Image: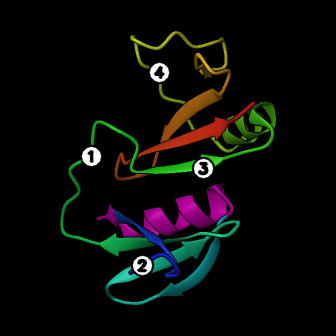
Amino acid sequence: MLGKAEALANVGISRPDAARAFYVDTLGLNLISEDEFAIVVSGSGAKVRLSKVPMVTPAAYSVLSFDVKDMAAFVKQAKDKGVMLQRFPFLPADDDGVWTSPDGARVCWIRDPDLNLIGVAQHP
């Protein structure tokens, strides 16, 4: 039924100005549109609807994920822009805050201004 429909990720935000700055200026996603209900951004082949809501309750898991080709470059750019990588005591990370999964994927997590958890991975 939806096999040919375009998927659109939804992330709740309660601070639109901070979210726009983070997703567009910091992460480098393209601003598609903005209205009283949402900000829509896009990356390589995907769109994300940042839905304006009164309050966000951050999930304990990633609500959005990105695949990158060069984790070291991402980490450097993130740090240069003041983005803090999240650390979890149950996942041993390297000095940069990147965890290597059993299949060899290198994974890190960041948070947006509403504390939504975003995963970033480089697959082998």
Looking at the rendered image, the disc whose residue lies closer to the viewer, 4 or 2, is: 2
Q: What's the residue at 53%, 81% (across, down)?
A: 4
Residue 28's disc is none
- Residue placed under numbered mark 4 in the picture: 87
Which amino acid does the dot numbered 4 rest on? Answer: Arg
Query: On the rendered image, what quadrant is the C terminus found in?
Result: top right
Closer to the N terminus: mark 3 or mark 1?
A: 1
Whether residue 77 appears in magenta in the rendering, the answer is no
Residue 67 in percent (x, y) is at 66, 47
Which amino acid does the dot numbered 3 rest on? Answer: Phe
Q: Is residue 16 left or right of residue 22?
A: left
Residue 109 in percent (x, y) is at 51, 35
- Residue placed under numbered mark 3 in the picture: 66
Q: Nearer the viewer, residue 3 or 40?
A: 3
- Residue placed under numbered mark 1 in the picture: 58
Q: Is residue 6 above or below residue 100?
A: below
Closer to the N terminus: mark 4 or mark 2?
A: 2
Looking at the rendered image, the disc whose residue lies closer to the viewer, 3 or 4, is: 3
Query: On the rendered image, what quadrant is the N terminus found in?
Result: bottom left
Looking at the rendered image, the disc whose residue lies closer to the viewer, 2 or 1, is: 2
User: At numbered mark 1, what does the secondary structure look like: helix, strand or loop?
Assistant: loop
| Dot 3 crowding, Cα within 10 Å, few <14, some 14–19, many 20+ | some
Is the magenta region chiefly helix, strand or loop?
Answer: helix
- Choose top left, top right, bottom left or bottom right for residue 77: top right
Closer to the N terminus: mark 4 or mark 1?
A: 1
Among all residues in the image, which is located at the extreme front?
1
Which amino acid does the dot numbered 1 rest on? Answer: Pro
Residue 2's disc is 2
- Choose top left, top right, bottom left or bottom right for residue 46: bottom right
| Dot 2 crowding, Cα within 10 Å, few <14, some 14–19, many 20+ | few
Looking at the rendered image, the disc whose residue lies closer to the viewer, 3 or 1, is: 3
Q: What's the residue at 53%, 87% (across, down)?
A: 33
